[in-house]
Amino acid sequence: MLVVGITGTLGAGKGTVVEMLKEKGFVHYSARDYIRKRVQAMGLKPDRDTFTMVANAAREKEGGDFIAKGLLEQANKDGKNCIIESIRNVKEVEYLKKHCNFVLLCVDADIKIRYSRIIKRDSETDNVDFDTFVADEQREMSPTDENKQNLGLVIRMADYTIDNSKDLDNLKQQVDKIYSCLPLRHRLTWDEYFLEVVKTVAKRATCDRGRSGCVIVKDKQILVTGYVGSPTGLPHCDDVGHLFKKTINEEGEISTHCVRTVHAEQNAICQAAKRGIALEGATLYCTMTPCRVCAMMIINCGIKRVVCLNKYHSGQESEEMFNQAGIQLDFVSEEVVKYDHQ
Ligand SMILES: [Zn+2]
Ligand SMILES: [Zn+2]
C-alpha cells in the first residue's frame, strides 16, 4: 500500500490533483472530513470555527499528528493505495514516513493566480483583499507551536512539487509524470519476509507469558522453525496453567519465570538436531532478544546473525555475549518487552 500525502498552498489546486489521482485508483481520506466526523460525534455545529477549535484541542491532547494517525489506521484497514489530504503539520509527515510507504506531494502556484482562483470560488470565507491574503499566508508559513500547523516546513519536506500556475493539461502532465515514478508496490525485503514468517510461527505458541516464534535461515532459505511450547507429549500452559519458578539474582531481586516450555529458539535448534541440519553460518530470526540459555546455544550452533522484532527488558547479558562471540545482532524495533508480575 502506498500513501500519498498532499500538501500545498491555498488555491493551488490540491482538490484537482486529488481528483486526478482518484481516477488512477487511489482512495481519498480527507483531514477535513475526519474533523467533521469528530465534530458531529460531539454534537457540535459543523462550522469553520468549531472545526478549528476541535482540531486544536485534539492536537493539545493527542499530539500534532493525531489526524495522520487516525487516517492511516483507516487506510490500513482498507489496505488500498490512498491519498491523505491535507498535510499541514511536520509531526504528521514524520509519523507517516515512519509508519507506512509514504510519499509527500506538494501543490503550489503563483500567488496572484491562486488569489484570483480563490476570488472566483466566491466562498464567504475566502473573500479577502490581496494584501490580507498574502499576510494570512505568511503567518501560516512561519513556525509556531510544534503541535500547530506549519505549512512552510511541511512544503519543504515534500518529495515532489507540482507548479500549477498553467492550465489543466499542464497539471495533468505533471501528475502523470509523478504517478509513473511512484513506488506503488513495496516488495518485502528478506528480513521483513522472514520476520513475517516468525509472526505466523509464533501464533502456534502455547504459553501466553510470551508467544514467541523463531525461524532459522541460510542462503535465503528457511531451514527450521520453532515456537514456545512444552516438550512433545507434555501438557501445555494454555491447558494446565504455567509452571512458575522463582529466581534470585546476585542483587537479591526475585523474578518469576514460567519453566514449562522449551523456548522458540531452542525448539528450532532441536528440530535441526532431529533432522540433521547444520546451522553453521545461518541467521536466526526471533520475536525478542534470546534469553541467556538460548544465546549460549545460538553461539555454539555457529549461527552468525540474530534478528529480533523487539528488545527483551533483561536482554543485556545476551547482547553482551553475542557481541563477545562476534555475532551480529539487529533489532527491528527499539520497543522493549517486559512480562507482567515478573
Ligand atoms: Zn507458561
Ligand atoms: Zn530462551
Image (cartoon, helix red, strand yellow):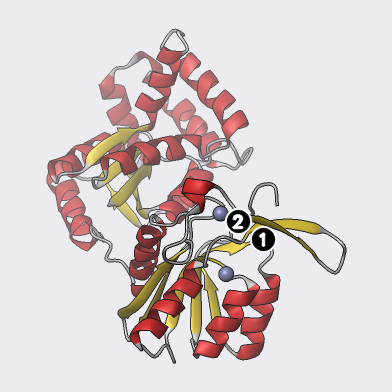
Distance from the alpha carbon under mark 1 to that under mark 2: 6 Å
| Residue most extreme to the right | 251
Residue at (66%, 68%) from the top-left corner?
315
Q: Secondary structure at mark 1?
A: loop
Relative vertical location of residue 227 with respect to residue 29 in this rendering, above or below: below
Identify the residue position indicated by label 2 in the image.
337
Give how far across and how far down residue 222 sits, in percent.
32, 77
The mark that comes first in sequence, 1 or 2, is 1
Q: In the image, 170: left or right of 66?
A: left
Q: Does the closest atom of ligand 2 sit within 8 Å of the Cβ of label 2?
A: no
Q: Which is nearer the eye, 80 or 260?
A: 260
The residue indicated by pointer 1 is: 313
Instruction: Give the residue displayed 51% in from the left and 32% down from the top.
Output: 135
Circles 1 and 2 in contact, beta carbons < 8 Å: yes
Identity of the residue drawn at 22% across and 62% down:
181
Q: Residue furthest front?
A: 233
Residue 7 in picture, x, y percent from top left: 38, 43
Q: Nearer the viewer, residue 139 or 181?
A: 181
Q: Amino acid at mark 1?
A: His
